[in-house]
Image (cartoon, rainbow, N blue to C red):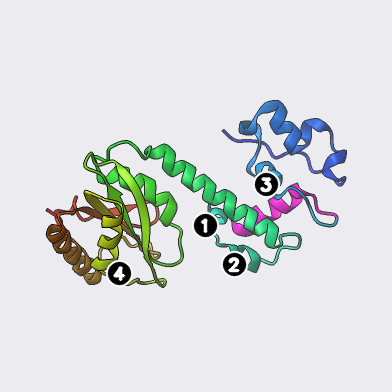
């Protein structure tokens, strides 16, 4: 649904008609009726100088290019936009709000205590969490005997094009959580989901180590931009 941007006023928001004030509008009509800039204005809370919170929100969205592009920006990238009125507190608030939205999306996609039955279910959880990271993060997802997620853990964080991880680090965590099996997940900041030689080599090492530990490596997912690669689906894991 296309929402119409509200009328622009030269007055502070608290002097606008109540029907046009973002917070009052949300309380009266519901969040669904607010534009992206109005919702962002509520998150920003206050304006700066002659700019209202809604003006700041519009400027932030315009300079970012879109809501999606804003959501992909890190704290440092938002600060680097040098928007007067967007300081540390507002930049942190925007980043925290985006991260909460990603986690909510992941939780809604697959409730934690449901059994995992496909790579798509794991991907639906971790694509929102990992796809926009600027550096590579290697995680392990630990499952019980019913293929339900016990928890996950970040095993290693690297640079824009790589990270290092050993079976010892992964299976130390698996034993700690009494996992029956696990799924490996890492992102490619480039967006290219095809596995590298290093990805294939570490996966083979993990599978072999899992056999020795009686903890199965069920899959290894590479996360790209709204896409993923599954070693199991590709027939690279028995």
**Mark 4 vs mark 3: which is more N-terminal?**
3
Tell me the mark number nearer the camera, choosing from 4 and 3. Answer: 4
| Chain-order first, disc 2 or disc 3 | 3
Q: Secondary structure at mark 4?
A: loop
Q: Which numbered marker is on residue 43?
A: 3
Mark 2–mark 3 distance (CA, rounded to whole Å)? 18 Å
Whole-Å distance between the Cαs marked 4 and 3? 38 Å
Of mark 4 and mark 2, the one earlier in the sequence is: 2
Closest to the observer, 86 or 182: 182
The residue carrying pointer 1 sits among few (fewer than 14), some (14 to 19) or many (20 or more) residues within 10 Å by Cα, namely some
Left or right: where 103 falls relative to 92: left
- Please tell me how crowded label 3 is: few (under 14), some (14-19), or many (20+) other residues with Cα within 10 Å: some
Query: Within the image, what quadrant is residue 202 found in?
Result: bottom left
Q: Which residue reaches farthest top?
A: 28
In the rendered image, which residue does mark 2 sit on? 76
Secondary structure under the numbered disc 2 in the rendered image: helix
Asked which quadrant contains residue 163, the reply is bottom left
Quadrant in which residue 149 is drawn:
top left
* Residue 69 image position (x, y, % from top left): 54, 55
In the image: residue 32, left or right of residue 128 = right
Marks 4 & 1, CB-CB < 8 Å contact:
no
Please name the residue that numbered disc 1 is placed on: 72
Query: Marks 1 and 2: in contact by CB < 8 Å?
Result: no
SS of the residue under disc 1? loop
- 197 or 216, which lies in front? 216
Alpha-carbon span between mark 4 and mark 2: 27 Å
Q: Which residues are magenta?
A: 50-65
Q: Is residue 52 magenta?
A: yes
Looking at the image, is mark 4 or mark 1 earlier in the sequence? 1
Residue 54 pos. (x, y %)? 74, 47
Q: Earlier in the sequence, mark 3 or mark 1?
A: 3
Q: Can residue 200 be seen? A: yes
């Amino acid at each position: 649904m296309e929402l119409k941007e509200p009328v622009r006023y030269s007055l502070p928001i608290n002097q606008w008609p109540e029907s046009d004030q973002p917070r009052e509008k949300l309380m009266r009509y519901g969040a669904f009726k607010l534009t992206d800039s109005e919702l962002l204005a509520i998150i920003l809370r206050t304006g700066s100088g002659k700019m209202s919170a809604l003006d700041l929100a519009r400027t932030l969205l315009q300079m970012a290019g879109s809501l999606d592009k804003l959501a992909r920006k890190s704290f440092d990238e938002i600060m680097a936009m040098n928007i007067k009125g967007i300081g540390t507190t507002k930049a942190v608030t925007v980043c925290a709000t985006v991260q909460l939205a990603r986690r909510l999306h992941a939780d809604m996609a697959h409730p934690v205590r449901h059994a995992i039955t496909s790579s798509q279910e794991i991907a639906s959880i971790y694509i929102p969490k990992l796809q926009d990271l600027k550096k590579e993060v290697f995680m392990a997802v630990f499952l019980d005997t019913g293929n339900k997620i016990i928890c996950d853990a970040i095993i290693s964080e690297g640079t824009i094009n790589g990270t290092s991880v050993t079976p010892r680090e992964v299976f130390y965590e698996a034993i700690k959580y009494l996992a029956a099996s696990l799924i490996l997940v890492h992102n490619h900041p480039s967006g290219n989901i095809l596995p590298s030689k290093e990805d294939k080599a570490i996966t083979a090492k993990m599978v072999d180590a899992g056999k020795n530990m009686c903890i199965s490596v069920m899959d290894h997912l590479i996360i790209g931009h709204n896409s993923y690669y599954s070693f199991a689906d590709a027939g690279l894991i028995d």
